[in-house]
Each structure stands twice: as C-alpha cells, then as structure tokens.
Amino acid sequence: MLGTTSASKKLAQMIYGYWQSQCLYIATNLGIPNLLQSEPMTVEAIAKATSTQVETLYVVLRALAHLGVFAEKPGRVFAATELSEQLITNAEPSLGHFLLHITEPSMWDAWRELGNSLKTGEVAFERAHGKKFYDFFMTENPDSRNLFNNAMSFLTNQAVDSLFEVYDFSQFNTVMDVGGNQGALIAHIVNKFGCKGILFDLPHEVETAPAFLATQGLDEDAVQVIGGNALEEIPKGADAIVIKYFLSVFSVEDAIKVLTRCRESLPKQGKVVLLQTLVPPRGAPVEYPDGTIPALAAVQMMVTNPGGYWRTEQEYKSLFEASGFQLENVIYTGSSLTVMEFQKSSSD
C-alpha cells in the first residue's frame, strides 16, 4: 500500500496506529481476552458470547491475530497469547484497563479537536464535551471513572517494585499521597515500609478509596483518607508528601500553587518526593524500555487538561524552586518513572 523504504515503513506504522488501537479497544471492551483466558474458542462461540456478528467479528479477530494479540488456529479457533493475557479486565487492574481508558470514545472525540484547540487556546477535551475532563470522568460517567481508577492503579502497581528497590520510604513517619486517587500507591508504601499514610485528593476522587484500601491487607487506621482541593489547602500531619503524575494536570501557575500548599503543610525538614515520567532533553533517547514516549504522553495530557503536560527534569526543578523547595536528589528507577526528591528551602 505504501513505499518500502525504512522511512515510509515507519510512517506507515504511525498511520495505521489508530486502526490497531481501535481493534484492541473493541476486543477488550467486548471482554474477549477474558473469554479466551481459560480455553480457545471458535469465532462462532465468541460471537454468541459477545452478541456480535460472526463474519465481521472474524475480520477484527484475524487482524489482531496477525498482530500477535490472539492466535488463530485451524477452524477459525482463537486462543490467548502473552499479549492478550495482559488485557484481561475481570481480575486486578491491568493494561487492559489502561487501554480502555485511553482509547474510549470520549478520548477519541477530544483528540479530534486538538487541531482546533491549537488555534483557539481551548482545551481539546472541553471543546469536544463542553465540560472539564475530571467532571466528565469522575462525577458524570461512572463506567469511565472506574476505568480511570483501575488504569491509574495499574500504572502504580507496574512501577512500585523498581521504585522500592531504589527509594526507602521507611525514613518517614507519615507519608501523604497528594492526588493519590483511590490509594494504590500509598497502600503499597504503607505495606512495604510500615509508616503511616494519608491519602489526599478531591472528594469525589477518594470516594472509592476506603473500599479499595480495605482489600489491600492494611490495618484499619493505617491510611487516613481526606478529601479536599490541593489548590486551596493541604492537611498537615505528614513529614513527606509523595506526588505521582499529579502535577502533570496543572498549568505552571497552578502547579506552583499546589507546591506552595505542600510547603505550608510540611514541617521544617519535610520533603516532597516527586514520582514522574520525565520528558527527555534534546539528544537523549525518546522512548523508555517499557515503550513510554513521554513527549507523546505530554500531548495526551494537554488534550485533557488546561495547561497541564509532562515536563522535563529542569522544568520540574524550576517549578519547585519557585515554590520554596530545593532539589536534593534525582534517582532513576530503571523504568519510565524517575524519583526527584525535594526539601523545603533553608529560608523556611
């Protein structure tokens, strides 16, 4: 269909990318990876179980089999593969939940408005839906909210092993996760290091947290759940604040407000531990070993949030310095997540 040079092949892969992600979305949304996890099934059986048309379903499944997501056997029988097993959504948070969150129709609608938003300055998601991203996902669409929560928990679960190999949270008595959603990260920290935990996020973000935390093997009083607005006030009581990806949703001005509230919340020797995927500087590798391309993810953040996007190490350092913090340490975990440790400036 396209030329055969390496350049045209690379472009072809980009052009066909949304075909692939939409086929993945359809199959995962239908629960086909769940169906095939126990045994292979004929396309007829899959169609019956998913209330779909046999022949059109077959075309989609064959394409995914050619991509290695499923395996096609004689007789139009389809079986699970290592790839499809990562898309199972009827157990713990998985890559399947992340896929469904990133590729659901409301996200596609937002990306369609990106070109217009570049000209008008509007947020693409708000232009497409007439409401803010978190209002749409967190308060008005419970299915989307559940996908978002599970997607964020998956990202946390994926990162904690390499994080805990290089960073010791036991140096703190109480760790507060600001912007921690339903509490996956703080649950891991408290379970691993034995400190006390505080989970702080918007009230509608932490609604599901008590039920989630109850499944994590924690003592009843191990994590205090508090709802509030980080732009206005952050509760006291922690000697360390951990922030994972949360600053990415804010403009420079609002990020400084959040960090200023963090500084006000912390004691004199308090620290902020930023956990973030950093956009590489010019000339550095652009893709992490897990396939994350931060500069592309930064566009996704810009599509959904006013002024928010993934930043470089220097940009985060500047944000913290403007908020009364100084950088103490940068630790690379070996995954796409980097630890930047900040302490309150000595003038505080």
Image (cartoon, rainbow, N blue to C red):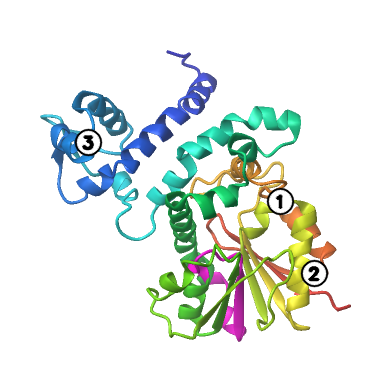
Asked if residue 167 is among those painted magenta in the image, a careful observer would answer: yes
Residue at left 33%, top 52%?
89
- Where does label 2 land, which residue? 326
- Where does label 1 land, which residue? 312
Q: In this orientation, which residue lies closer to the viewer: 231 or 63?
A: 231
User: Is residue 62 found left or right of 297 in the rendered image?
Assistant: left
Q: Secondary structure at mark 3?
A: loop
* 274, above or below 33, in the image: below
User: Is residue 346 found left or right of 10 in the rendered image?
Assistant: right
- Where does label 3 land, which residue? 51
Q: CA distance from mark 2 to mark 1?
A: 16 Å
Residue at left 54%, top 84%?
195
Q: In this orientation, which residue lies closer to the viewer: 87 or 250?
A: 250
Crowd tier of the residue under label 3, counting other residues whose Cα lies within 10 Å: few below 14, some 14–19, many 20 or above: few
User: Is residue 47 found left or right of 130 in the rendered image?
Assistant: left
Residue at left 47%, top 79%?
192
Q: CA distance from mark 2 to mark 3?
A: 57 Å
- Magenta residue span: 165-185
Tell me the amino acid under the disc marked 3.
Ser
Crowd tier of the residue under label 1, counting other residues whose Cα lies within 10 Å: few below 14, some 14–19, many 20 or above: some
Dot 2 or dot 3: first in sequence order is 3
Q: Secondary structure at mark 1?
A: loop
